[in-house]
Amino acid sequence: MALIKGIISIAAAAAVFWRLAWPVSRAVAASYLLACWAIAGSTMLIWQLSYIVPAALLFHAAAMSLLLVSWRER
C-alpha cells in the first residue's frame, strides 16, 4: 500500500509541477504546494508504518484538496 501511495504522490507532484509552469495566483500556488507537502509527508508516515490512521486521513485530505483546487481554480 505504501508503494501505491508513493506512486500517487509522485504523480500528484508531477501534475502540480506541470500546472505551475503557467501563471497562477499566490493563493492557488500555496494551496498546491501545501497539498503536495501534505501528501508526501503522509506517504512517508505510511511507508514507516507509524501513525497509519492519521497518515491515511492526511493523505486522502491532501488528495481531495488537490482535486478541489484544480477543479475550482480560475
Image: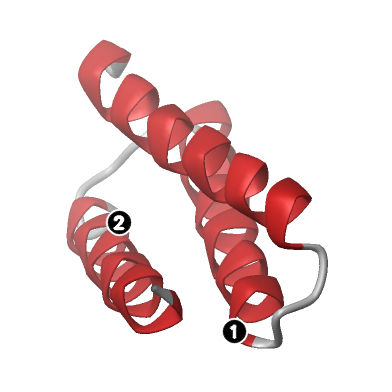
Image quadrant where residue 43 sits: bottom right
Q: Hey, what amino acid is under mark 1?
A: Trp
Q: Is residue 73 left or right of residue 42?
A: left
Q: Which quadrant: the C terminus? A: top left
Vertical arrangement, residue 47 with respect to residue 32, above or below: below
Q: Which residue is mark 2?
A: 16
Q: Position of residue 14 (x, y in %)?
A: 24, 70
Q: Split into 4 quadrants, where in the image is the N terminus? A: bottom left
In the displayed structure, would residue 54 be above or below residue 46?
Answer: above
Near mark 1 (Cα within 10 A), the count class, few <14, some 14-19 or many ≥20, is some
Q: Earlier in the sequence, mark 2 or mark 1?
A: 2
Residue at 29%, 18% in the rendered image: 73
Compared to residue 6, the image places residue 38 above or below, namely above
Q: Secondary structure at mark 2?
A: helix
Residue 20, quarter of the rendered image:
bottom left
Describe residue 5's horizontal placement relative to residue 49 as left or right: left
Q: Identify the residue at image location x=38%, y=78%.
A: 6
Q: Amino acid at mark 2?
A: Val
In this rendering, the answer to whether 33 lies above or below 48 is above
Which color scheme did the rendering employ for the protein? secondary structure
Tag shown at residue 47: 1
Under circle 1, the secondary element is: helix
Residue at 41% from the left image edge and 41% from the top image edge? 63
Q: Tell me whether circle 2 and circle 1 mark residues in contact (CB < 8 Å).
A: no
* Alpha carbon separation for disc pair 2 and 1: 22 Å
Left or right of 36 on screen, residue 6: left
Image coordinates of residue 17 in percent, x first then y, are: 29, 66
The image position of residue 68, as x and y in percent, is 35, 21
State the mark number for residue 17.
Answer: none
